[in-house]
Amino acid sequence: QSVLTQPPSVSAAPGQKVTISCSGSSSNIGNNYVSWYQQLPGTAPKLLIYDNNKRPSGIPDRFSGSKSGTSATLGITGLQTGDEADYYCGTWDSSLSAHWVFGGGTKLTVL
Amino acid sequence: EVQLLESGGGLVQPGGSLRLSCAASGFTFSSYAMSWVRQAPGKGLEWVSAISGSGGSTYYADSVKGRFTISRDNSKNTLYLQMNSLRAEDTAVYYCAKDISYYDILTGYFTWYFQHWGQGTLVTVSS
C-alpha cells in the first residue's frame, strides 16, 4: 500500500486529454513539492514534472502538473501512442520517519 | 551530459551481501545529493536511500534501515549501496539518481526530486 494513491490505470484515444491523480496527506503533498516520472516499457524512469508544475527542458508542454491541498494532478494533452507508459508521482514525506514516497504508479494506455 | 552507470548487481543467496556502485559524470558530483531507488519485478518504484552531497547526512526507507548503508566517494565520483542480510523481497532493479533538493524560503516548502536516473542494475536474492 503506497503512501500516495494513484489510479492503477487510465486510458484515452490518440489526440485526447487524460489526467492522473495523486492523493496524499499534509505530511507529504500538503507541505512539499510534487514531482512526476514517466517510465516507458523496459526503460529507466525519467523526470517529467518537478516543483508541482515545472517542466525540465525537453519535456513538451503537452505535459502539465498542478497541486491543490493534499492532491496533485498530471495532465497530458494531444495523446500520442508514444505516451504509453507508467507514470509515478512522488514527494518528500516530513513525518516522523522522514523519507521519500512514490505513488503506486498509473499505467496509461493510448487506445 | 549527465551519466550515471550502476554496477555490482547479480544473484545472491538470502542472508548474503552485495555492494552496488554508481559511477557519475557530467556534473559536479560533490554538489548534489544522490539516491537509490528500486523496482521489484512487475512492481512500482520504491525509494531506498539518499545521501547529501558531502556524505554527512543519510536517509533510509524503513524496509532497509539497519541492513543497507549508502555512502559516496566524491574523489571518485562514485555512489555506493552496501546491502547486507539480503532477503527475497530485496530482489529488484536498483537505480541510482541525481537529486535536486532545497528548502524554498519563499513558500516554506521542501523540494526533493530525481533529476537524472541511471539505467539500473538487477539484484536477485534467491537460493
Image (cartoon, helix red, strand yellow):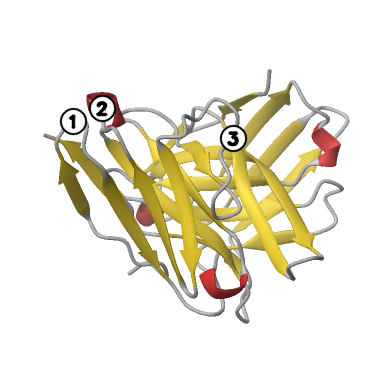
Q: Amino acid at mark 2?
A: Gln
Closer to the chain start, of discs 2 and 3, is 3
Q: Which residue is mark 3?
A: A56
Among the 4 quarters of the image, the one containing residue B30? top right
The secondary element bearing badge 1 is classed as loop
| Chain on which label 3 sits | A
Q: Amino acid at mark 1?
A: Pro
Checking the image for residue A80, the label placed there is 2
Q: Amino acid at mark 3?
A: Pro
Residue B85: x, y in percent?
Answer: 52, 57
Closer to the chain start, of discs 3 and 1, is 1
| Chain on which label 1 sits | A
Q: Are marks 2 and 1 in contact (CB under 8 Å)?
A: yes
Checking the image for residue A14, the label placed there is 1
In the image, residue B22 sits, relative to residue B26, either above or below, namely below
Q: Which residue is at 49% across, 75% downward? A: A69
Q: Quadrant of the C terminus of chain B?
A: top left
Q: Quadrant of the N terminus of chain B?
A: top right
Checking the image for residue B56, the label placed there is none
Task: Identify the residue at the far left of this view.
Answer: A111
Residue A88: x, y in percent?
Answer: 40, 50
Residue A23: x, y in percent?
Answer: 39, 69
Q: Are marks 2 and 3 on the same chain?
A: yes
In the image, B18: left or right of B44?
A: right
